[in-house]
Each structure stands twice: as C-alpha cells, then as structure tokens.
Image (tube, rainbow, N blue to C red):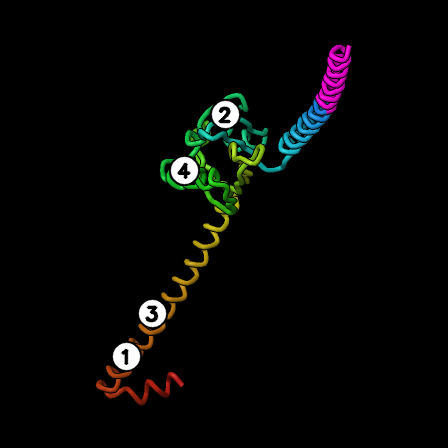
Amino acid sequence: MASENLNESADKNAEKRNGALKRKYIALKKAMGRKITELEDTRREFFSYLENQQDGAVIVDMMGRITFCNPQAAEICGYKKEEIINRHFRMFLTLDDLANGFKLFYNILKGEYSTNNLFRVRCKDGSTKVVEVNAAPLHEFGKVVGGLSIIRDITKRKQLELENAERVEEFRQFDRDLDIWKQQVNELKHEVDALLVQMGRGKKYQKEAA
C-alpha cells in the first residue's frame, strides 16, 4: 500500500513537472512568434525605406553578390533591377576602381563604416558615371552578413568642378601671359628709346611722346 502511494505521488509530481514544462514551452513559443513577427515587420520597414530613398541603395552578401537594389541605383547604371540582382559588384566598377572597390568591401566585412568614397561605375550604354558611396556593414544576430551602400550620382557636379577648374587655370594662364607681354613691351620700349638716342632723336621723341 505504501509503495502504491509513493508511485502515485511520483506520477503526480511528474505530471506537474511536465505540465510546467509544457506551459513554459508554449509561452516561449508565443514569445518567439512575436519576436519573429517584429523582426519581419522591421525588415519590411527597412526595405521599404531603402526602396523610397532618393539616392541609390545596394546590398551585397558576404561573397559580394548584389542581393538588393532599389530603383534609383538601377537608374544610375541604366539597368533594370533584375539585371543587377545576383551579379557581383565588381561588374559595375571601372577597371581603375576595382582595387579600391574590393578594399572598401573587405573593410565593411570587418565591421567598418566608410563615407565619401568616389567610384566610377560602368553603365549599360557603355558610358561612365561618377558616384559617391557611403557604406556600412549589415548585422544579423550580432554577426556581419553583408554590406549596405548608399550611392549618389555626382557626375554633373564633378563635370562642373572640372570645368570651373579649367576656367580658373585659363584665367591664371592669361594673367601669367599678360605679365610676360607687359615685360616684353617694356623691353621693346627701352630698345626703341636706345635706338632713338643713337639716332639723335631721343629728346625729340620724348617731347612728342609727352
């Protein structure tokens, strides 16, 4: 009889433990579900924000493949979004900028942020554009999983800066030439004065010039 009571008591204790574990599991499952929903909502908001950016936005994975591209980034290069997705970022850089592109990529994978980087990108029509790139690492659960780049087309600004620099240099060259011309005119005047003196007309010339 005593043995039966002990077994019955053990069974009840086991049922209580199992019931407590089951309730904890259900509570944990609900909490996990809420967390996943929050993460999914945050993810949707994040990509919606990037989609509506005025500047271009590109995300690459750990291999350098483009996994996201907003319409603005596609427009800069003249491609459709589906023509960019899953392609390596190096395909859109000029040969002269490849080394700097990979350097930036590896720095991002190390968790570093980088701003005001200038690159020349190759467009679908064969032309080249100058872009300013601000890049940052992307994290999931504390680990870097890729990189985000915000891209701004500054081709027109760079062209204006170059044109302005050329104009400034033209004015500087003109100023230098003007100084040379003045010096040459003064030297020529002295030569004329000396020649007139030799001809005995120096005083007359000076009076006429006065």
- At mark 1, the secondary structure is helix
Which residue has dot 4 on it?
102
- At mark 4, the secondary structure is helix
- At mark 2, the secondary structure is helix
**141 or 113, nearer to the observer:** 141
Residue 106 at x, y = what percent? 43, 38
What residue appears at the point 39 percent right and 36 percent down from the top-left corner? 94
User: Which disc is residue 180 wearing?
Assistant: 3
Q: Are marks 3 and 1 in contact (CB under 8 Å)?
A: no
**83 or 17, nearer to the observer:** 17
Depth check, mark 1 against mark 2: the one in front is: 2
User: Of marks 3 and 1, which one's residue comes earlier in the chain?
Assistant: 3
The part of the chain drawn in magenta is 1-27
Quadrant in the rendering for residue 184: bottom left
Depth check, mark 4 against mark 3: the one in front is: 4
| Tag 1: amino acid | Val
